Image (tube, rainbow, N blue to C red):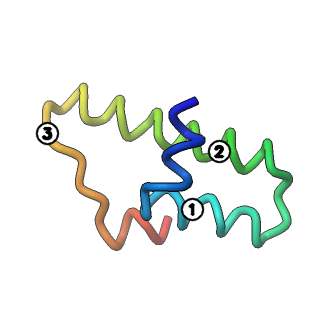
Amino acid sequence: MPVLTAVKRNPWLRTFYLRLRAAGKPLKVAMIAAMRKLLHAIYSVAKHRRPFVATEQARAV
C-alpha cells in the first residue's frame, strides 16, 4: 500500500514508475517494480543508518 502513495507523491519514485509505464509495462508490473525499488531504499537506510537522499544518478537508473 505505501507504493500507491509513493508513486503519486514522491518525485523520485514517480519518475521511475512513469518511465516504466511509458515503456509499455502493464500497471501491476510497474507497480511491483516501484515497490521493489522502494523496499531497497528502505533497506539501505536501515542498514547504513543514513538518511535517504535521491540523487540525480539514482533517478537515472
Q: Quadrant of the N terminus?
A: top right
Give the CA distance from mark 2 to mark 3. 23 Å
Residue at the (54%, 60%) spot, across then down? 14
Q: Residues at badges 2 and 3 in contact (C-beta under 8 Å)?
A: no
User: Could you tell me which residue is drawn at 78 percent across and 70 percent down?
Assistant: 23
6 with respect to 35 (left or right): left
Give SS at disc 2.
Answer: helix
Amino acid type for the residue under numbered disc 1: Phe
Q: Which residue type does callout 3 highlight? A: Arg
Where on the picture, by quarter, is residue 36? top right
Circle nearer the N terminus (1, 3): 1
> Which comes before the other along the chain, label 2 or label 3?
2
Name the image quarter holding residue 57. Answer: bottom left
The crowd level at tag 2 (other Cα within 10 Å; few <14, some 14-19, many 20+) is some
Q: For the residues labelled 1 and 2, say whether their Cβ atoms are less than 8 Å apart.
A: yes
Which badge, 1 or 2, is on the more N-terminal residue? 1
The kind of secondary structure element at disc 1 is: helix
Residue for badge 3? 50
Mark 2 residue type: Ala
Residue tagged 1: 16
The label on residue 33 is 2
Residue found at x 79% / y 42%? 28
